[in-house]
Amino acid sequence: MEGQYGEGQDPGIYSPKVRLFYTPPAALPAPFPKTLHIEGFPLYLTSSGFIRHTLNALYSDLSITLSKLSSPPSASSPSSTSRDSGPGKQKKISRDKSVILSMTVLGTSRMSGSKAQWDIKCTYTFSPISGLILSHAVDEIDPAPHMTAYEALRLALGMRWIGAGSGAAAQTAVSTPATGGGGAGAVVRAKVD
């Protein structure tokens, strides 16, 4: 992997093929697809920088509080099995591992001075081969981003000319990658610069 990334772009805990997904609660206007997604570490890193800079432009005193880290119960996978003690019995074992991370983003609007808060819930899935983060699904953003935010994003990305159904050209993200650790129930505070 040496030389594959630019300076400061070491994927660390992320797979080079990391995928980010977000399905908003309300359908988005054209040209956005039903589910926003990106694939690859460079786009993942770029999307997190874009969101960080956008939030810093609109809000001051931004902070992130990680409020919960949990592991969902493992689902059975048909790809791997192990022998049970009884003859002819097989127990299915899943090699897919994931964690659910809940966080709160707080900030003060630079325009109105009012406080803003978003509760975000994400699921990170790890590669069964490398152990690196393979996917990042944004399960919830409460309150959900308003349609005007998507319109501004569409215009900022120069997608005025893109028609409906051009999902591949509209790949973007709405969340930053979480950093740091902590056990279940741990609270970690971070200042967003």
Image: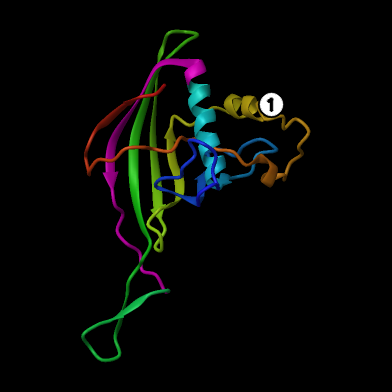
Residue 153 picture location, percent across and down: 62, 28
- According to the picture, the residue beneath numbered tag 1 turns out to be 155
Q: Give, as a single range, the part of the protein colored magenta.
A: 56-78
| Quadrant in which residue 146 is drawn | top right
In this rendering, the count of numbered labels is 1
Estimate how packed mark 1 is, as few (under 14), some (14 to 19) or many (20 or more) residues with alpha carbons within 10 Å.
few
Q: For residue 76: magenta? A: yes
Residue 49 picture location, percent across and down: 51, 30
Please give left or right for residue 153 compared with residue 176 in the image: right
99 in relation to 143, above or below: below
141 in relation to 18, above or below: above
Residue 128 visible in the snapshot = yes
Residue 73 picture location, percent across and down: 29, 58
Q: Residue at x 53, y 23 (%)?
A: 54
Please give left or right for residue 156 compared with residue 48 in the image: right
Q: Quadrant of the C terminus?
A: top left
Please give left or right for residue 88 compared with residue 77 in the image: left
| Quadrant in which residue 50 is drawn | top right
Secondary structure, mark 1, is helix
